[in-house]
Each structure stands twice: as structure tokens, then as C-alpha cells.
Image: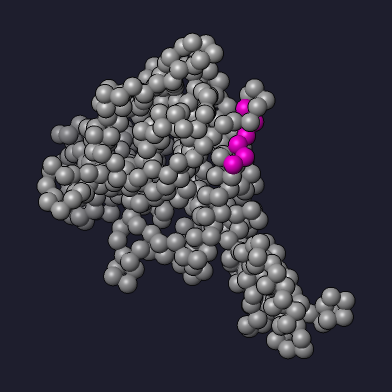
Amino acid sequence: MTTTTFSMEELVSLCKRRGFIFPASEIYGGINGFWDYGPLGTELKNNLRDAWWHDMVHCPPIGPDGEPLSIVGIDSSIIQNPKVWEASGHVGGFNDPMVDCRETKSRYRADHLEVIANSNGEGRMYAFIEGDEESFERARKLLAKYEKIDSLGDEYSTMLLTDIPTDAFERIVGPNTKEVGTLTEPRQFSLMFDTTVGATGGDDNKAYLRPETAQGIFLNFMNIVDTMRVKVPFGIAQIGKAFRNEVTPRNFIFRSREFEQMEIEWFCHEDEAQQWYEFWCDYRKEWWQKMGLTTENLQMRQHDSDELAHYAKDGCGTFDIEYKFPFTSPGYGELEGVAHRGNYDLSRHTEFSGKKINYFDQEKNERYTPHVIEPSAGLSRGTLALLCEAYTPDDRPSKVFMKFNPRIAPIKAAIFPLVNKNGMPEIATKLHEEMRKKHVVQYDAKQSIGKRYARMDEAGTPYCFVIDGDTLEDN
């Protein structure tokens, strides 16, 4: 069992020091919500991506009927016809409630702020960031101090800011402020990044960066059916970047404005949808365990009715696969969602495009619009979960080592000549040249052997080969 015994600050420091992840455009002061992956981070992320693609597309799992699943891959455009996002519901409904603090100039998602108040509903109320223990503790102490509450056992209550009446905002003290009434009332904030296509600009040429990769799959459903000889049930997979203008990017790469998704849209008959929904929930959790995430740090959680997305209809639902990140502990944060989207998306694109998007089953002589089960994983969040799981404080000289599953480790092995003489470098160089043909390996002859081991500890390299005096004798 992995217990969180480190802070995110320690992990972020290691990621910067060892070349996993850097702030984007750091020499210009950075830009909030954007990150660059360094050499080790790129290898780690690519290894996770390639493992997913191999296990989902090249060698997909065995289905409930005992047969291998049929899944094909695509790579759709980041910018699509803007009508796509009208049909999908994103232009009209992809918004978050936002509040600003007039004192600190900070901006918050209203549904990410909670308020702690005296149970009698009188006096000041103190806002804190949901899931942030430090923010909560500060609000709790201020409430006890100013409302003269000796014991906070049963004498306080908490609620989301979005549930607070607007006439009570003048009594709320925002996070990291001292005065009441500094928070604005919530207002809707579009998460869509817009741009213009062509030379003339203007609203007539407005387009959007995609907020999810799923729609590119739905748009190509008929192309795949017509060209790939697939039969329902089958899946279409895609890995790619998505963009959301998050109100408050936070927690390192967990909530950023540019991120990568690994998504499958699994098309099936409505009568079989529940069976496939249960299959994908089980399999996707098992897959993350194979990548090295421990059972104790993973959980499945079904969305409540008020959390369901706009495409969810009666009988549809979503399970989140959640991971216990250091910033959510002892709680969990979303890693992947497995959603039953119904036939919402294909039906909407049929309606808005005027083109028929359906499937004809020749054996049953039946034409229908398939239902969709969507396992949608965050590649960026998955990379962060692997980093958190691997981070292991230790007594060794490096004080920490990264314990990656060898399959996703950025560097598979290091080759060290014990000393840089006596023929050892020649043997080590030859071994390195042979191994690098098949694996990502690193040759290192600088500094003491202990320091070289320490570097590999922090990089999460599972194997080290040392060429020493015995090698010269027995090879």
C-alpha cells in the first residue's frame, strides 16, 4: 500500500530538477495552466500512451463473449466546423460558474468553493477551496475566532458556495482575504477557446479548439463503417490534445488548459449497452492497476444525478475511476470516466448535419443508431498519477527514488563503467550500443558510482548494469 508521505511541492521540485515537467514559457514568467514535458516526462507520457494504444487497439482485451474486441484508431483534427460544437452542446452549455475576489484579484470556480458557517446561520461565513485541507483549516480557525465557537464539533456546517443565497454574499470572507463581501456573485464562464479561420477574421469565421477528442470520432463513424469492414459492437480510439479555458487551473498538471486524452467510443446495440458498460468499468480499472497504480489508491465512484453530463439520458450514467492524489488525500480525484452516452451524439450530428448516421445489421435486417460506451482517460492526469505513485521517500543518498513499472519507466536501464579506464568504458560502450537498438538506455561514466545510482533512482530507472573488474575476467 502506498501512503502519501510527501507534498506536491516535493514532487513538483523533483519533476523540474530531473526534467520531467517544466512550466511553459518559464523564462517569460510562465503562463497559468500550461506545461512543457521535459526529456523524462516525454518518455513517461509516451510510454503510457503507447501502452494504452497497444492494449486497446493493437491487442484489445477479450470481451464478455470470449472474443477479442474490434477497435480501430483515428487521429482527427483539433479544429472542426464550428457547427460540430453547437450539435454537441458545448457552445451553449459548456460553462462553469465563476467568482472573483475584489481584494486578492483571485478567480475561483464557484462549485469548487465551500463555505463554513455557524450552524445557526448567523454571523460571518468563511469560504475555502474544496479538498484543500490547508484552506479549510484556515477557514475553520477564523470561524472559531470571530464567532467565538469553543468547539467546532456540531456547531458549524459547510455548503457549496453555489448553494448560498446571493443576499448572504456580503457576510462571506473569501479564501486568503480578511474582509467580508469581497466575492462577486457567480457568473457563467465559457470553457471554449475560440479562434478565427482565414484572413478576414470576425465572428463569421469563428472556430474553436476542441474541448474533447470524442466528437472527432462521432463525425467519422460512417467513414469507419464504410471503409474498415467493422461490425457493431466495435470501438474507435483516439489519443490527442484538448483545450479548456479553465477558470482556475491548479494542482500541477491535474487541471490545466491544454491536456491530452485517451478515448474510446464503443458502439453497441442498446440492448447490450449495460453489459458493455459494466465490462469497460471493470477492465479500465484493472488496466490502471497493471500500469502500477495500487488498489488502495484507486476507487470507482458513480456520478450523482446532479453531476451527469448533458448527453446523459434516462438509464445512462458515468463511473469515475479515481486516484488518491496528494492534493486530494484522503479523498480522490478523477483519473478516467466510463460513460454511457446513449445515442445522443450520433443523433445530434444527424440532426444538425442533415446526414444519416446509423448502422445497418444485415444479419438481423435492422437499422439503428448505436449506443455508445465511452472510456475516456486523461493522459496528462495518468502521467501525474504514475509520478505520484512512483515517488518514494527513502534513506538512500538521493533521499527519494521513483518506483515505476518497468513498462512505463522513461529509462529502461543504465550502463556504468565502474571506472573510466582499464578497458571498462569500451565494454560498457559496446553494451550500450547493442541495448539502445531495442530499449531507451543511458550511458553514464561521470562522477562516483553512488552519484550515478542516485541519478537513476530519481529518474525511476529499474535496472543498472555496472562493468567492473569481474566483467573483464568473466564477461
113 is within the stretch colored magenta: no
| Residue at 79% across, 79% down | 468
Q: Main secondary structure of the magenta part?
A: loop
Whole-percent x and y of residue 233? 53, 24
Query: Considering depth in this image, is 252 or 370 the residue closer to the camera?
Result: 370
Question: 425 and 395: which one is in front?
Answer: 425
- Against 410, is 313 above or below? above
Nearest to the observer: residue 15 or residue 24: 24
At a point 73% along the width and 89% down the height, the residue shown is 421
Residue nearer the viewer, 49 or 297: 49
- Image-quadrant location for residue 21: bottom left
Image position of 98 (left or right of 386): left
Residue at the image point whose x is 21% and y is 56% from the top: 104
Residue numbers of the magenta segment = 58-63
Above-or-below relation of 429 to 254: below
Q: Position of residue 450 (x, y in %)?
A: 68, 77
Q: Position of residue 61 (x, y in %)?
A: 62, 34
Q: Residue furthest front?
A: 227
Q: Where is residue 339 drawn, in percent x and y?
A: 45, 29
Identify the coloring. Answer: one colour
Judge whether 185 appears above or below 17 on screen: above
